[in-house]
Amino acid sequence: FLGTAFIPIKNDISGNVAKVRTKYESGIDKCKYIEDLIEDDLAKNSGKMGSATEGLLWLKRGLEFMLEFLSEMVQVYRSSTDKTKTDNLTGSINKAYNNTLKRHHGFISKQLFKIVILAAPTRSTVLKALAEGGEGMDDICIDHVAAHLDNFRTNVTNIVNYYIIKKLDTPNPLLRN
């Protein structure tokens, strides 16, 4: 639902999912929890990040971005008296990017993001996709997204904190985990 400009990002996410899935499927009995997968990957790589742990690191970062983006979209929509002024998501996407992924990207990735965001979908396009094509369901969709944010945040925070504890990532001073 984010449009064709985001296909490279979707492909990157799919590649990271494949890395984690491959690791999981190679030792299902050892990987009941995501932490088990990380521990096994670290053990097999002499305490360093293996392919699955690195793939999960980037998935975690992507989830942090999505969480911040969705939270910002809900907050902007709910705080506005004129909902038409909330249709442009560029501000929400930029804020989420600046607070999450930007610190991990090099010069080229940052420049690419500036181009990709020009093709960002509108809020109404995103919500219509969530409503499976239904029209006039923005309030309902926003409520549904908002209803899942706390659980989403809890799960993302657990992964973030585990990576920090294991010294596989550093705390983000811009987020409230």
Image (cartoon, rainbow, N blue to C red):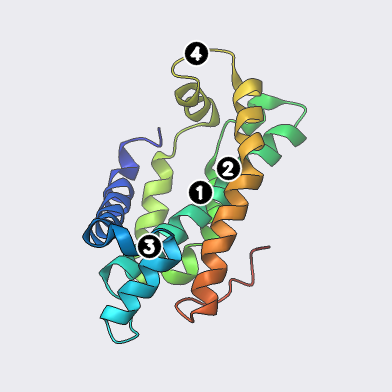
Task: Give left or right: position of 152 versus 58.
Answer: right
> Could you say whether the residue bearing mark 2 is in a helix, strand or loop?
helix
Q: Are marks 1 and 2 in contact (CB under 8 Å)?
A: yes
Say which label, 3 or 4, has the lower sequence index.
3
Say which label, 1 or 3, has the lower sequence index.
3
Q: Are marks 4 and 1 in contact (CB under 8 Å)?
A: no
Which mark, by number, is residue 37? none
Of badges 3 and 4, nearer the viewer stands 3
Which x, y percent locates residue 123? 54, 31
Which x, y percent locates residue 136? 59, 13
Q: Is residue 24 above or below residue 10?
A: below
> In this figure, what is the number of numbered marks?
4
Residues packed near mark 2 inside 10 Å, few (<14), some (14 to 19) or many (20 plus):
some
Image quadrant in which the N terminus is located: top left
- Residue kind at label 4, given as amino acid type: Gly
Q: Residue at the spot x=47%, y=62% of the render? A: 101
In-front residue for pair 32/94: 32
Q: Which residue is mark 3?
A: 56
> Could you say whether the residue bearing mark 3 is in a helix, strand or loop?
helix
> Could you say whether the residue bearing mark 1 is in a helix, strand or loop?
helix
Which mark, by number, is residue 134? 4
Q: Are marks 1 and 3 in contact (CB under 8 Å)?
A: no
Residues packed near mark 3 inside 10 Å, few (<14), some (14 to 19) or many (20 plus):
many
In-front residue for pair 113/154: 154
Say which label, 2 or 3, has the lower sequence index.
3
Q: From this viewpoint, is residue 72 visible?
A: no
Q: Are marks 2 and 3 in contact (CB under 8 Å)?
A: no
Image quadrant in which the C terminus is located: bottom right
- Residue kind at label 3, given as amino acid type: Leu
